[in-house]
Image (cartoon, grey):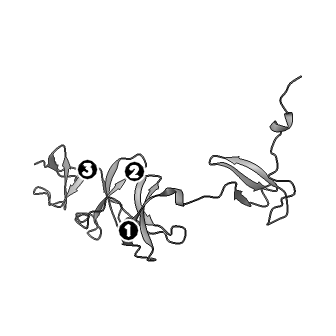
Amino acid sequence: MSKIDPSLFSGQPSAQPGEACPRCGAALQLRHGKHGAFLGCSAYPDCDYLRPLKVIEHDDDVEKPLEGSACPLCGHTLAIRKGRYGLFIGCSHYPACHYVADINDQGNSDPACPVCSKGHLVARTSRYGKRFYACDAYPGCRYIINDKPVAQTCPDCGFGILTERKGRLCCPQKGCGYQQ
């Protein structure tokens, strides 16, 4: 005879006895997804009600409040926060205000975008941690380069920027082989 209780391994147990879905009145069940467990309606195709099991706390992401700096949107203090792609500066009043600033911002010394001439090439970080440079007028201009841009025009082809690659200045334009 086994000492293991078979009721522990039954299919999909309900969340709490007697708890009903607020939309349709059917029972809520414990479901499992790629982001963890959640409560879902047992009448799923007809009712798509979901509720997380744990309440998400946004204060765990705050590393350090920045004294003397205010959010330009709502006026609350800014804080250094920890996110999916590393540290960033964001509003401390997060769920109500979504202001975000780049932690690596050193003023507007970014070179102008050579393609659209409206935006500037700003440093971004990919989800893998690699640094790249893209136009900040993103939906309208999709120009992107991997090397650090320098605000000098190419003397051979006249392209608007040069890039730093292995200690040399190179032209990022295809077909132009300029190197300094």
Q: Which kind of residue does numbered mark 1 sit on?
A: Glu
| Sequence-first tag of 2 and 3 | 2
Left or right placement of residue 54 versus residue 88 in this view: right
Left or right placement of residue 136 versus residue 96 in this view: left
Nearer-the-camera pick, 97 or 41: 97
| Number of callouts | 3
Please give the name of the residue rendered at 79% of the width and 52% of the height, measured from the top-left corner. 15
For numbered disc 3, what is the local secondary structure?
loop
Marking on residue 126: 2
For numbered disc 2, what is the local secondary structure?
loop
Nearer-the-camera pick, 50 or 169: 50
Crowd class of label 2 (few under 14; some 14 to 19; many from 20; radius 10 Å): few
> Which part of the image, by quadrant, shows the N terminus?
top right
Where residue 59 sits: x, y (%)?
Answer: 53, 60
Marking on residue 67: 1
To which quarter of the image does residue 46 belong? bottom right
Nearer-the-camera pick, 108 or 76: 76
